[in-house]
Image (cartoon, rainbow, N blue to C red):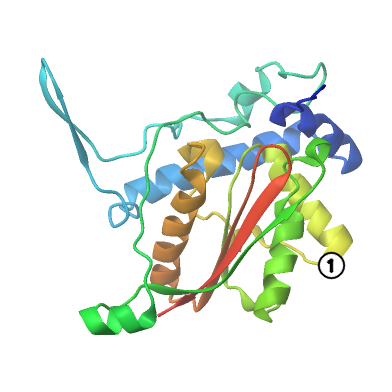
Amino acid sequence: MKSSVVRCPQCMGPHSLEYGITREECDKLALVSHQRACKAIDEGKFKEEIIPVEIKTKKGITVVDTDEHPIRDASLESMAKLPPVFIKGGVVTAANASGINDAAAAVVVMSREKADELGIHPLVKMLHICGAGVAPELMGLGPAVAIPKCLKAAGLRFEDVGYWEINEAFAAQVIGVERKLAEDFDIHVDRNKVNLNGSGISLGHPVGCSALRIVVSLIYEMKRQSCKIGGASLCVGGGPAMASLWELM
């Protein structure tokens, strides 16, 4: 039996060629991600959703309560100096790819009846959640099929959703998703309604946690904006993707 594995970064080369994605575009998206994350930290936006963790060491107790990955002095000039990785002449660099980070996230899910019984006012209601897939060599573009599928199942249009969290695995991947949505589904993403507080490139991409992390961040941004309906989506290694829709309660 033979198996072939397509590494996630290797998929970004075909994406960039098919959709005309440039290195400059990727670096600009990455820079905005870092700027948004740093601004959100300074404004205290993550305090509601982060539970401080105490780390005991020989030197005392260290409290971890702030994301460590965002780069405050990020610039297009410094990003431009980095060589492409994985593919010669490619657009992916260490600066416009997501960080490898450790994290944990948790939510409590229950029926409305149980919430009423316990006297709990829920933050949001799950409208729909679904999975969809693309071929392994197209890995990264999965949200561009998962999002329309989720919207259709929920009976909603893209315009009905006021805010989105779409995880940044790579800048080229995010741009590829935008262009596939536009070309295949006539869905045009407004970046002023997506990832306003940074995403995988700036905050990091703790695999196994990111999906729930972006949902938690989505919920609190929906609260801040009094946004009635929000959505979250991310790609998964190998081709799958997930999308979910939520209603503010």
From the viewer's side, name the closer residue of 154 and 78: 154
Is residue 77 visible to us here?
yes
At x 42%, y 42%, the residue is: 38
Q: Is residue 121 above or below residue 232?
A: below
Left or right of 156 in this view: 186 = right
At x 82%, y 54%, the residue is: 180
From the viewer's side, name the closer residue of 24 and 173: 173
The residue positioned farthest toward the front in the image shown: 1
Q: Is residue 134 above or below residue 162?
A: above
In the rendered image, residue 143, in percent from the top left (x then y), is placed at 70, 54
Under tag 1, what secondary structure?
loop
In the rendered image, residue 121, in percent from the top left (x then y), is placed at 29, 79
The quadrant in which the N terminus is found is top right
Q: Is residue 134 above or below residue 90?
A: below
Is residue 158 visible to us here?
no
Quarter residue 90 falls in? top right
At x 79%, y 48%, the residue is: 134
The quadrant in which the C terminus is found is bottom left
Left or right of 65 in this view: 167 = right
Left or right of 200 in this view: 87 = right
Left or right of 161 in this view: 23 = right
In the rendered image, residue 152, in percent from the top left (x then y), is placed at 73, 75
Quarter residue 32 falls in? top right
Q: Residues within 10 Å of mark 1 (few under 14, many from 20)?
A: few
Q: How many marks?
A: 1
Quarter residue 239 falls in? top right
> What is the three-letter code of the residue carrying label 1?
Asp
At x 82%, y 43%, the residue is: 135
In the rendered image, residue 9, in percent from the top left (x then y), is placed at 71, 28
Q: Which residue is mark 1?
A: 186
